[in-house]
Amino acid sequence: MAKKDRIWFVIALVLLAAFYGIWGVAECWLSNRALAQYDWDSHDNSPAAQLKLRVICHQIISCKFGNHHDAFVALIAAGDRDSIPYLINALKWHEPTDGSDIVSCATEHCHEALCKLTGMNFGYSYNDWNHWWQTEGAMMSSAELARLAAGRAAAEQ
């Protein structure tokens, strides 16, 4: 490859990386903006509204930065089986680093959403939740997860 071709190749790579970086920041920002502008007072519990809210929340917690707290709170009510991997992955950014069970409010809401959706409780450990999901949870149907969650809710009452 000639020197001139290598220079253009490097320029193309730099521009591509910048484009994807800008795209990622814009997606994260737009999702956070959509959640901030979400009409919480509408009480629209239709499947379409729930799906829209889930998609927004999934986009937010897919990024390391953003309003994870409100997304976790929304997923406690609107989350479904598809939300579980997003919540588990977000937990790795929120789990306590010192091994204690002293956690932020956002972490507690993430944990609450995971427990509600799965009927399981592995604490705040990303590794424990991820291991369970990879070995058992991902193979469970939505109905099986709903039965586990219902059993946990009944036991708590």
Image: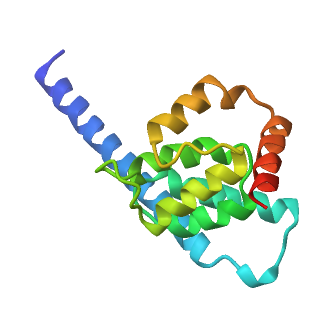
Residue 30 visible in the snapshot: no
Report x, y in % for residue 56: 63, 60
Q: Which residue lies furthest to the bottom in this view?
A: 41
Question: Relative to residue 122, is residue 103 depicted above or below?
Answer: below
Q: Which residue is drawn at 86% across and 38% down?
A: 143
Apparent side of residue 54 relative to residue 43 in the rendered image (left or right): left
Report x, y in % for residue 10: 21, 33
Image quadrant occupied by the C terminus: bottom right
Question: Relative to residue 120, is residue 101 depicted above or below?
Answer: below
**Nearer the observer, 1 or 36:** 36
Report x, y in % for residue 28: 48, 60
Residue 98 visible in the snapshot: yes
Apparent side of residue 61 relative to residue 73 in the rendered image (left or right): left
Apparent side of residue 139 relative to residue 100 in the rendered image (left or right): right
Q: Residue at x 71, y 80 (%)?
A: 39
Q: Which residue is drawn at 54% across and 73% down?
A: 33
Report x, y in % for residue 54: 69, 57
Image quadrant occupied by the N terminus: top left
Question: Relative to residue 5, is residue 150 depicted above or below?
Answer: below
